[in-house]
Image: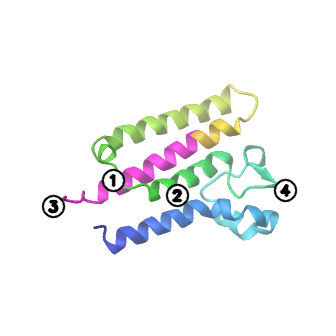
Amino acid sequence: MPSIYHILLRLLLILAGALPWLLIPFGSDAQGMRLAFRSFCHQIPERSLIFSDSPMVVCSRCAGIYAGMAIGAMTPRLGFLARHGRKALWAVLCVALLDALIQNHLAHSVNHIFRITTGFIAGWAASAYLFSSIEKPRKVQAL
């Protein structure tokens, strides 16, 4: 059974991951939150999703990372991630980095689908790996 600390950490990551998405209805009224996220994201308007003529508080890649982090925190412990998670995490981070390099240096337009997808996979892998690594597997007792 996970400890109370693991449960609280899961809840914190779920809330933190959902927060940029929950702020969408507030649009430009979320200036305080925009400042809070500035240290985590460049917030370039051209690279951010636009809702009701207002950019999201984070760019599309960070939006994917936050969403993936929240979903990863809801993912039950995965044995293969506990064993091979570090390699998987490096692989998805390399894909996200490759996507960033391509969009920064080769592509002329921003592709939000790729940015969200690579961010989501990286956020999910990091969060799911974290919990797969710190939580011990449950022992099944014979009846």
Q: Are marks 2 and 1 in contact (CB under 8 Å)?
A: no
Front one among 9 and 39: 9
Tell me the kind of residue under disc 3: Gln
Residue at the far left in the pictured view = 142
Residue corresponding to mark 3: 141
Residue corresponding to mark 2: 70
Question: Which residue corresponds to the image point at 31% horizontal and 40% vertical from the top-left?
Answer: 84
Measured Cα–Cα span from mark 3 to mark 4: 54 Å
Question: Which residue corresponds to the image point at 67% horizontal and 28% vertical from the top-left?
Answer: 105
Question: From which residue to which does the magenta span run?
Answer: 118-142
Question: Which residue corresponds to the image point at 15% horizontal and 61% vertical from the top-left?
Answer: 141
Residue corresponding to mark 4: 52
**110 inside magenta stretch:** no
Image position, residue 74 (x, y; %):
46, 58
Q: Secondary structure at mark 4?
A: loop
**140 inside magenta stretch:** yes
Image position, residue 111 (x, y; %):
70, 35
Q: Return the disc, 3 or 4, that comes first in the chain's sequence.
A: 4
Q: Return the disc, 3 or 1, that comes first in the chain's sequence.
A: 1
Measured Cα–Cα span from mark 3 to mark 1: 21 Å
Q: Are marks 1 and 4 in contact (CB under 8 Å)?
A: no
**Residue 24 falls in which quadrant of the image?**
bottom right
- Please state, as top left, top right, bottom left or bottom right, where the C terminus lies in the image: bottom left
Tell me the kind of residue under disc 2: Ala
Measured Cα–Cα span from mark 2 to mark 1: 14 Å
Image position, residue 35 (x, y; %):
69, 65
Taking the image as shown, residue 47 lies to the left or right of residue 95, namely right
In the picture, the disc for residue 132 is 1
Q: Return the disc, 1 or 4, that comes first in the chain's sequence.
A: 4
